[in-house]
Image (tube, rainbow, N blue to C red):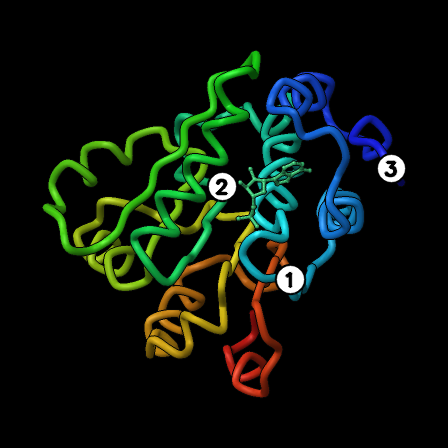
Amino acid sequence: MSTFNQLGLHPSLTEAVASENFTKPYPIQAEGIPAVLGGGDVLGIAKTGSGKTASYVLPLLHRLLQPEARRGKDLAGPSVLVLVPTRELAQQVRAVFELFIVSLPDRIKSLAVFGGVSINPQMQALRNVDILIATPGRLIELEEKNAVKLTSINTLVLDEADKMLNLGFKDEIDAILALLPASEKRQNLLFSATLSDDLSSVNQI
Ligand code: AMP
């Protein structure tokens, strides 16, 4: 697999990728994009700089462009949840989604929420969000305030999962997993720079 055109992505996405001068998929993208499109769970061992973000952003946008993903969307909550350890990563991941969203024919809405800033603007911005990128603590606060429902999530991404565990987010992650549809009813994507025993202790991802 040596070009983006061979990966099965929507033509708007292959055009967007070309206009960003992504000439060739990085290895994690060549392997990861078809795996995510295939619908199964994916474990990616990848550091920052490997291109891991686009390896899930592109296939998830592809799925959101399918007609069935648009039906009834305004009534439901977000369908994609990306959990990240830090505000910086939340903003970076959203920027990668937005980089491609701007060239797409459908309106797809992404939002990053994180702690350390006022919660009210985030509560208001949550309306009609398709893709929610969140740090665990703030997501729980928003859920407790009934600002977001997580019952419509069909794809969960844990990005920098090892860092989330190192920062002590395990209890929050478990609490969030309990609010999502059952594990077998969603696609689970886990990215980590290292693979440790701790990761398998994240309950039933
Ligand atoms: P990441 O590992 O996801 O943080 O991505 C690292 C950097 O590589 C980002 O600045 C991306 O814009 C860039 N990048 C990702 N995939 C490609 C690609 N296939 N070709 C060129 N640049 C890329």
Of the pair 153 and 134, the residue shown nearer to us? 134
Q: Residue at x 82, y 35 (%)?
A: 7
- Ligand 1 shows up in which quadrant of the image? top right
Q: Amino acid at mark 3?
A: Ser
Q: Residue furthest toward the right?
A: 1
Query: Whole-percent x and y of residue 137?
Result: 26, 63
Q: Residue furthest toward the bottom?
A: 197
Disc on res. 184 = 1
Q: Residue at x 28, y 46 (%)?
A: 113
Spatial CA span between label 3 and label 1 = 32 Å
How many neighbours does mark 1 have within 10 angstroms: few (below 14), some (14-19), or many (20 or more)?
A: few
Q: Residue at x 63, y 53 (%)?
A: 50
Position of 52 with respect to 202 (left or right) is right
3 vs 1, front mark: 3
Query: Whole-percent x and y of residue 41?
Result: 69, 59
Could you tell which of marks 2 and 3 lies nearer the N-terminus? 3
Q: Residue furthest toward the top?
A: 105
Q: Amino acid at mark 2?
A: Ser
In the figure, residue 127 lies in which quadrant? top left
Spatial CA span between label 2 and label 3 = 30 Å
Position of 115 with respect to 90 (left or right) is left
191 lies above or below 24: below
Q: Which residue is mark 3?
A: 2
How many neighbours does mark 2 have within 10 angstroms: few (below 14), some (14-19), or many (20 or more)?
A: many
In the structure shown, which secondary structural element does the residue marked by tag 1 occupy?
Answer: helix
Could you tell which of marks 3 and 1 lies nearer the N-terminus? 3
Q: Which residue is mark 2?
A: 79
2 vs 3, front mark: 3
Position of 163 with respect to 29 (left or right) is left
Spatial CA span between label 1 and label 2 = 15 Å
